Amino acid sequence: MNTIPIRHKWEPYLWLLPSLLLMSIFVVFPIGIVFKLSLSQISKSGVVGGWYGLENFRTAFRDPAFGTVMLNTAVWVVSVVGLSTLLGFITAMALNTKFFGRKVARSIVVFPWATSLVIQASVWNYIIKAEYGNLNNVLLNLGVLRSAVNWRASYQIEFAWECGVGIFVTIPFVAFTVLAGLQSIDDAYYEAATVDGAGFWRKLWNVTIPLVKPSLTVCTVLNIIYVFNSFPIVYTITKGAPANKTDTMVTLLYMRAFYDNQKGAATAMSVIGFAILCVCAGAYMMITMRKEEQ
Amino acid sequence: MRPSTPDVVARVNRRALIAALLAAALCLVALSLPLYGFSATVFAKKSGNTFVGDEKYQAVRAEVEEAAAVYAAEHGGTPEIVETVTERVNSKGEKTSMVAFEVREVMGRSGWAFMRSGLAAGWLLLAAALCLIAGLILLCAGLAGAWTVDWPELPASKRGLRRCGAALGLAALLLIPLFLMRCNVDFSRQIKLASDGYAGAGLDALLHRLDAFLYGGSAGENTLSLMGGVSYRALWPAWALLPLLCVYTLAAVIAAEGHPAHALTRGLLYGFIIALCVLILYPYYVMLITAFRSNAETTDMYFTHMFPTQWVWSNLRDIINRGVPRYLLNSLLLSVGATAIALLCGIPAAYAMARMRFVGKRAFLGFVIMSQMFSPVVLLVGISRLMNAIHLNDTVWGLMFINAAFNQAFAIWLLRGTFVSISSEMEQAACIDGCSTVSAMLRVLLPMAAPGIVTTLIFVFINAWNEYTISTVLISTASNKPITVGITQFSSFNMIEWQYLFAASLVATIPVVILFMCIEKHLAAGLTAGGVKG
Amino acid sequence: MKKLIALVLAMLLVLGCCAAFAEGDGITLDVIICQYGPNTENWFLGDGMDGTNFVAKFEEANPGIKLNLQVVSWNDVYTEVSTRIQNNNAPDILNIDVFANYAADGLLLPVKDYCPDELFADFFPSFIEQSVIDGTVWAVPDLASARALYVNTDILNEVGVEIPTTWAELEDVCQAIVDFYNGEVYPWGIDMTTDEGQAAFSYYVWNNDGGFVDADGNVALNSEKNVEAIEYAIGLVNKGYTNPNPATQTRYDLQDMFGAGKLAMVIAPNQLPSYLKDKDYNVNFATAALPVNEGAKPGATGVMDRVMAFKDDAYPDQAARNEAIGKFLSFFYAPENYVGWVSMEGFLPAVNSSVAALVESDPSFEAWLNVLDSCQFYPTALDNWDAIKQGVIKVEQEALTGGDVKTLLDDLQKEIAG
């Protein structure tokens, strides 16, 4: 084991202290406040009253949009995480082969990662505007289209666009984590596989995937959390319209808190969201870790 | 798989040559067939307040039929008369009716007609045909005199000729979609713009050519109104050009490379990479060109110009006057501060996690991951109450700590990975020599881990730079806003000023993108360390 | 290691000290102003007021009162205010559209506590009435705007139809435009977005003798008239007479379409001409009253924003604070300042004393002032107004996706009225 001797039993804890302190004050403490608020009565303009039991949770569950939004959230998380993992993996495979201009291509792929989500979302919102958006502009002027297309003809399509933007901004993160995994694979494995007569798909299945799995696991857990909590894309492009049909949980609770003045329900929803995340991320980690141990 | 004996080589080359010649010949045949079918209006007449069968109707009908007869006499063919009746009952209960007549003729235009027309599409088609013919000549020259030579031993000049032949085939192949797209532009887009009143020298010339192309110059003054009624579609010979040229190119590739599989996978790889890069760069292109458009042009509903008609550099000056430098400074302060705090706290923690054994290691890891699960949006209320309690509300300082705290997990994950990937032997030696753990870390480990630390540093910096949600709620004083919040003033509920929004976004994005490009090399390395042993 | 901890602690300490020493003497008023347009911030804080700004001018005229004034965008202002209230850090003076929630929570000072009588008498009485709950005035209007129908006269002339005055005529005109332009021009603009869908609701129900409340002032959202009105509006969308995405195309999108000649008719506020001018649009247009349903009384829609003062029980000298707030208002509404403020973004005034100067600077104001007289306003004095507002927007958006208007409004009424 790659460890060094320590002189006192308490020494490691001292090393952890600053980090622990920082996170306790600025992350855990607000979490506590939110939990407390979710059990308190909150007036419409935001004055905090006394103990309210589980009333806020009842309001949250009775919210007419709750069902739709949970479904949306599921679609959002599964599609964005799933497709960005798949596409990110392909991108990483491509970027890991040698070709002319690889350095430039790699630099370009990090772009979306380096750009603020609000900015990305605003740009895409502009791009898909039916009346003056840039997508119509480019496609018409290049001659791909004959007449302007309404790219957001229904809310289902708008939600699909939102998922698309979500995937677009998530790909670089996945691609680079997988790329990191790919680069650490020893060429000897592939040589051995070639000697055994394995083709591309068998090498992919038997060598590449098992070896990048650890990086993929971490990256998927983080992605689930980030994507679930992602707010600017939906908020910028549709604000959940029409009638919360394109909202995800996080935007719904923001709208409830700051547009509809249902702060109690909103804090309850944050706690529910937290619980869901804990269960999902926890279960995912347990499953993958158990598999690895076997 | 590869041809080796002269017999086999000769057979492969013969097949390739035959395929190439056949494909080229079929291409020429396709070019002589009608590539596009036009259903063009040669005469049009509208008559309001007219009912089918009444006097007015009869008169107009007769006029239209006469025009059709005249056209048939002059140009031949059988023009068709299309009659559209629009009937409506208005709210007063009265019936109204409008009749529109059109004399239409169906016509086809071959590739050679396109090439003679002087239309941009015609030039593209001509270029494609020339490419194909030149390619064929080069291919034959490359094959001549080296008929039985296996491709690994092929002299460079011969191989070069064959490759050029393949490349020209590819060029011809790519020119065909351009031709189809250009036809769309000429026949629908430009005509639409012209009929919407966007006249210009280019459009006038185009109308002239279209008149010559479709009506043999007889439409004259009426070209524009008649063109409004043209419908057109590409016929099968136009589409057939694509697979034929594919076959030709493939044949040339086989002759040049011996085996196409390698060329195909490379082609796929390049195709994927190019498509990906275009997709990724597209929003940045939009940002760039929109940032320098005039306010009116950002919402141009006729899509007249792909690029700004005039690059309005004063947009930059305007955003500077509206506080953007101040926001940038705030963002810089905030990001530097957050990075410093995150690393000062994160390095010791990561060191302990990497190098020491202790009870509660897993618990700490769980704690770190849990701290990531609450989104800032969810915690907004809690965070702002906390900030108020410690008098950091509405300050850049407050944001620094928040950002540092929310980036702890990522920082620890990356740093720990880096530390684990470095052997601890040197530190162990240093410890045995009597160094304290602190100095072992500072003097021995940190210099070795510098690349990983830089990666982490830039990561946190960028996350803090791009953070939006917390800042938007915590900061309300204009002079304390970071750039991500500052730019929202350009997209307020009242009015979206796209040009300023994107100019400011561009200014906010460029430094970060450059930073990220700088660490791109270390990025994968840093993530390797973090991921694999994570 | 210990150094690190010490450093962190030291930094925290320094920060705390900085915050503690920030207080000064005299009185400082926290003011939040909403951003009405690109000039607002410059007028209050930059150099948009003849080279100086409102804050500087005010502080010069009133030594001893400092203004901590922020201009907040409409996007953020609700978030900003509600977080500040939750943190017991409410502003002293707030400019926003709603007030009933704050009054219901006992956060507001009654206007008579701080507003000088002279100034109070200057407000249009019909405006003041809109801010009364149980006989107490809680806020004063800062400006108003009125909505009218704008039509593109070129399009209507070309199609050969008259400006519609009734709903039936409106459908005729829409159909004629659709026929003529093959759908290239949208006849009618509807904005049912989350931002301002309540306006669309009012345009139709008020022109069908319906409304948010009944004659007794009780919430009556599911009246027959309302159902008919909203069904009519949704019908326009479904028949293809309107812009294609009413749930996400904001009034600004509509105004742009109108300017570009893609939209024949739109209901917009009196600032539309200046908006079109700013963006170099070149359209010939005319204004008209909103079309009404046959037999119904026409109802123009007015929108009014307000200024209100929050309580601060912790402040030692309440009388001095009230006086300072009064001075702020007097200064703000003084014609030499107020005229500039109102005309800057093309709004309509809320006080009599500035009318003469405004009419002089722009004669078209007079017509709008007459419209303003007949305007109906949102029932913002209801403490559940924001629920009603979001509720009707949701009803519209649900109806757009195929919901039944009657059921939706019945459900909303049940939810709002208990």
Image: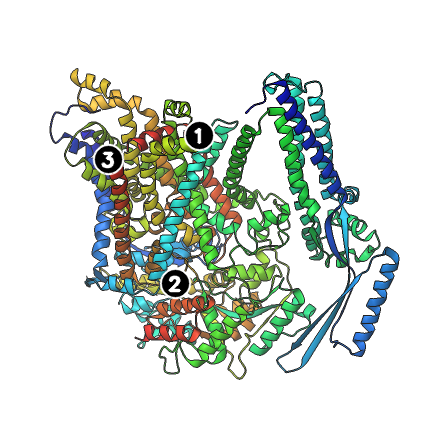
Q: Are marks 1 and 2 on the same chain?
A: no
Say what secondary structure mark 3 lies in: helix
Label 3 Cα crowd, 10 Å radius (few <14 / some 14-19 / many 20+) = few
- As measured in the structure, the alpha-carbon distance from the residue carrying label 3 to the one carrying label 1 is 28 Å
In this view, the mark in front (1 or 2): 1
Q: How many labels does the image show?
A: 3
- Residue drawn at point x = 24 percent, y = 62 percent: A56
Q: In which quarter of the image is residue C117?
A: bottom left
Q: Name the residue under label 1.
A: A199
Say what secondary structure mark 2 lies in: strand
Task: Report the amino acid beneath label 2.
Answer: Ile
**Disc number placed over residue C96 in the picture, else none:** 2
Task: Please tell me which of labels 3 and 1 falls first in the chain.
Answer: 1
Say what secondary structure mark 1 lies in: loop
Pointer 2 and pointer 3: residues touching (CB < 8 Å)? no
- Residue drawn at point x = 28 percent, y = 38 percent: B409
Where does the image place residue C124, in percent across and percent down from the top left? 43, 74
State the colouring used for the structure image: rainbow
Q: Do labels 2 and 3 share a chain?
A: no
Of residue A248 and residue A238, the one placed in the foreground of this image is A248
- As measured in the structure, the alpha-carbon distance from the residue carrying label 1 to the one carrying label 2 is 68 Å
Rendered-image quadrant of the N terminus of chain A: top left
Where does the image place residue A262, in percent across and percent down from the top left? 30, 63
Figure check: B5 above or below C376? above
Where does the image place residue B5, in percent across and percent down from the top left? 60, 18
Of residue A158 and residue A45, the one placed in the foreground of this image is A158
Q: Mark 3 points at which residue?
A: A293
